[in-house]
Image: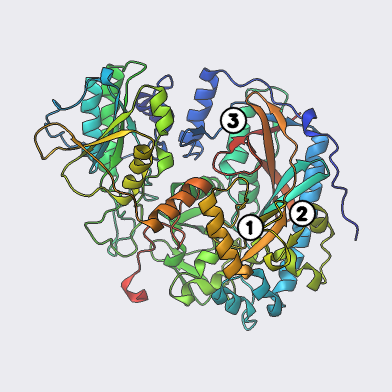
């Protein structure tokens, strides 16, 4: 399958939500990929029927986000990959002794899952008005491990502008959204802010943790801290997307540089 | 020296936008652009950022824009050279103190340019052409001005893209034997990564080995740039704004971008001098003739010398900073953002400039009247192409759409 066919499978040109699919990983398709891990079995009995017009945000780590998206596709949702990160240049090369060519966030498993998933999506086309399941990588900020020195910093954040507006969702009959996570707990501040903008526009938010049985629970997000809100308002207003130092997370210093 | 005439030979109502491509043709074009030509952000919120129709401008309009841009580029480079010998003026540009210190230290030579690229943003107005700014430091828009225009031109027989800045920039290094070129950007941001990926592709096609990194990962050994992951570099592309360099902790890692570096850079750090929106405030102190700049840039003052709080004809512009290439306008900026900018400009007026707003003539498009901005690239002083953008409102921001500029 060519990358063009693969992207068409994930972002069919005649589907409502395809324009929001992020092309970066498809454009950087590596020649060699690890095998896609077998998806873990999961219970989707909580998932609303597509006719109930609910958007789902799948915030699971790595390939699990893709696997869940594919499972939702089999229920009638349109999975929309929002992986907005970059593979390290020369990604086929093995990491060197000091970590060069290594990436902070491992994206290859996600790409492998996207490749395998494309076959499934091509085999079972979705209806034109399928509600969206936005796929993001819960590990996008790699907060649980220290990056290697000289590693390629491909951590990423999600923005309000990565999603359709609440008004666009409403035009397609969607006024409810479910955030799907592995565990209950705090949502990343970037996604928190994006969802808060939806909440302020009367989108009803719910949270479903896969580790917990039962249906999704109501999610009411507190107001972001004043400074965070101001920064994001500027971001939204001006379209700039940076921290003070000009990038996310900053340069990963080599020990010798202090 | 008298300026070139800035009057419009053809008014925007004589420019044309044909009907949009069919959804099928546009879908194919979009897919080629995102998968093969490094346009990775074709959708921002609800805004599809690629216009489905081109903007066709008369050849004479392109010639006059190119002539004006080349005159501006010549003046800009001369002004930078003079400013490097005038440390007394650097403070007035609003430069961060650490950068002022480095640029003022003439014990080291300015770092050489591998090529000098600038993009001047032109707008048609009732009084003729005006520029809103010069993107002198790290201009972007390469994939849009080169690849998008070329792909769009394939659908309009008889029309041509207006130049190809990507090829022109890669060709500009022909005087250097292809070796290893480092492309430096903020690694976490896709809008920057797509630019360096686009340029890296062009350099690789010309025989260069490419290495990617963050500016803070560059070591300087006897003035030569070195990346641990790749080795020594023969040239550097810096897609990282000059004022951010000074936020790197270790001055030895960033000083050679400005002075003392021996590896040539696109663009060397001294480009920050004319990136400042306060550049017009030192014009009267310079011997360099700036007739073209004076004829095209609206009146610009220190905020302390303009009644921008009461007079709606003034805009506020940050000299540098994250939103430095944006305008703060009381009428269109939200109340809280205006208040924030207002306080900042009152507390730190040296970091801001007040500039007269100007009316822009709209272009009729299939999407209704749109206000155009034609960003003309110059590379080593020669005009190389146009990055077209249009917005339904007077300011170009993230709601603007990229439009392929074609010429008969």
Is residue B152 placed above or below B307 in the rendered structure? above
The answer for how far apart the CA atoms under marks 2 and 3 are is: 29 Å
The answer to whether residue A35 is seen in the rendering is no
Residue at 33 percent across and 33 percent down: it is A203
Q: Is residue B68 left or right of residue B80?
A: right
Circle 2: is it few (<14), some (14-19), or many (20+) Cα within 10 Å?
some
SS category of the residue bearing label 2 = loop
Residue at 54 percent across and 66 percent down: it is B243
Mark earlier in primary sequence (2, 3):
3
The answer for how far apart the CA atoms under marks 1 and 2 are is: 12 Å
The answer for how far apart the CA atoms under marks 3 and 1 are is: 28 Å
Mark earlier in primary sequence (1, 2):
2
- Please report, as a chain letter, where disc 2 is located: B
* The C terminus of chain A: image quadrant: bottom left
- Please report, as a chain letter, where disc 1 is located: B
SS category of the residue bearing label 1 = strand
Q: Which mark is residue A34?
A: none
Determine which residue is flagged by label 3. Answer: B51
* The N terminus of chain A: image quadrant: top left
Identify which residue, A176 or B194, lies in the foreground: A176
Q: Residue furthest front?
A: B310
Determine which residue is flagged by label 2. Answer: B298
Determine which residue is flagged by label 1. Answer: B317
Circle 3: is it few (<14), some (14-19), or many (20+) Cα within 10 Å?
many
Identify which residue, A213 or B24, lies in the foreground: A213
Is residue A124 placed above or below B330 in the rendered structure? above
Mark earlier in primary sequence (3, 1):
3
Q: Within the image, what quadrant is residue B154 found in?
A: top right
């Amino acid at each position: 399958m060519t990358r063009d066919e693969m992207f068409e499978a994930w972002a069919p040109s005649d589907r409502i939500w395809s324009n929001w699919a992020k092309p970066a990983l498809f454009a950087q398709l590596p020649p060699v990929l690890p095998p896609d891990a077998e998806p873990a079995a999961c219970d989707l009995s909580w998932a609303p029927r597509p006719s109930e017009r609910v958007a789902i945000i799948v915030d699971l780590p790595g390939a699990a986000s893709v696997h869940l998206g594919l499972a939702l596709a089999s229920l009638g949702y349109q999975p929309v990959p929002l992986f907005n990160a970059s593979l390290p240049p020369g990604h086929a090369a093995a990491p060197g002794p000091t970590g060069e060519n290594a990436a902070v966030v491992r994206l290859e498993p996600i790409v492998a899952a996207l490749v395998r998933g494309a076959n499934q999506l091509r085999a079972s086309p979705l209806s034109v008005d399928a509600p969206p399941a936005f796929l993001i990588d819960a590990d996008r900020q790699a907060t649980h491990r220290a990056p290697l020195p000289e590693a390629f910093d491909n951590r990423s954040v999600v923005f309000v502008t990565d999603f359709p507006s609440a008004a666009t969702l409403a035009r397609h009959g969607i006024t409810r959204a479910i955030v799907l996570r592995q565990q209950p707990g705090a949502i990343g501040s970037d996604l928190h802010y994006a969802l808060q903008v939806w909440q302020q526009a009367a989108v009803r938010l719910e949270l479903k943790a896969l580790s917990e049985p039962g249906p999704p629970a109501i999610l009411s997000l507190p107001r972001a801290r004043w400074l965070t809100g101001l920064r994001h308002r500027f971001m939204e207003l001006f379209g700039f997307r940076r921290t003070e130092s000009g990038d996310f997370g900053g340069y990963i210093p080599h020990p010798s540089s202090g | 020296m008298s300026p070139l005439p800035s009057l419009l030979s053809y008014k925007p109502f004589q420019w044309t936008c044909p009907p949009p491509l069919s959804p099928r043709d546009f879908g194919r074009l979009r897919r080629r652009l995102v998968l093969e030509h490094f346009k990775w952000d074709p959708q921002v919120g609800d805004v599809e950022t690629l216009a489905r129709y081109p903007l066709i401008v008369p050849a004479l309009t392109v010639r006059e824009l190119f002539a004006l841009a080349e005159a501006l580029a010549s003046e800009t480079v001369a002004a930078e050279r003079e400013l490097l010998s005038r440390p007394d003026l650097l403070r007035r540009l609003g430069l961060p103190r650490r950068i002022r210190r480095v640029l003022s230290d003439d014990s080291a030579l300015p770092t050489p340019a591998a090529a000098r690229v600038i993009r001047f943003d032109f707008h048609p107005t009732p009084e003729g052409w005006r520029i809103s700014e010069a993107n002198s430091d790290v201009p972007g828009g390469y994939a849009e001005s080169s690849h998008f225009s070329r792909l769009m031109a394939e659908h309009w027989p008889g029309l041509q893209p207006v130049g190809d800045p990507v090829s022109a920039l890669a060709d500009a290094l022909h005087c250097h034997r292809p070796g290893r070129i480092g492309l430096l950007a903020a690694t976490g941001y896709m809008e920057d990564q797509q630019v360096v990926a686009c340029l890296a592709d062009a350099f690789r096609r010309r025989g260069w080995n490419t290495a990617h990194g963050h500016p803070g990962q560059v070591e300087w050994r006897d003035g030569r740039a070195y990346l641990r992951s790749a080795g020594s570099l023969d040239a550097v592309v810096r897609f990282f704004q000059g004022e951010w360099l000074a936020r790197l902790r270790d001055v030895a890692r960033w000083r050679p971008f400005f002075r003392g570096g021996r590896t040539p850079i696109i663009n060397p750090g001294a480009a920050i001098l004319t990136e400042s929106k306060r550049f017009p405030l030192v014009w009267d102190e310079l011997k360099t003739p700036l007739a073209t700049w004076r004829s095209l840039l609206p009146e610009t003052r220190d905020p302390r010398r303009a009644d921008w709080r009461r007079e709606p004809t003034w805009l506020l512009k940050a000299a540098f900073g994250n939103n430095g290439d944006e305008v703060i306008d009381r009428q269109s900026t939200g109340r809280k953002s205006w208040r924030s900018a207002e306080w900042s400009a009152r507390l730190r007026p040296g970091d801001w400039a007040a500039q007269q707003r100007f009316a822009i003539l709209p272009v009729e498009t299939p999407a209704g009247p749109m206000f155009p901005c034609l960003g003309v690239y110059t590379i080593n002083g020669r005009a190389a192409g146009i990055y077209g953008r249009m917005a339904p409102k007077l300011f170009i921001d993230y709601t603007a759409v990229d439009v392929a500029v074609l010429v008969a």
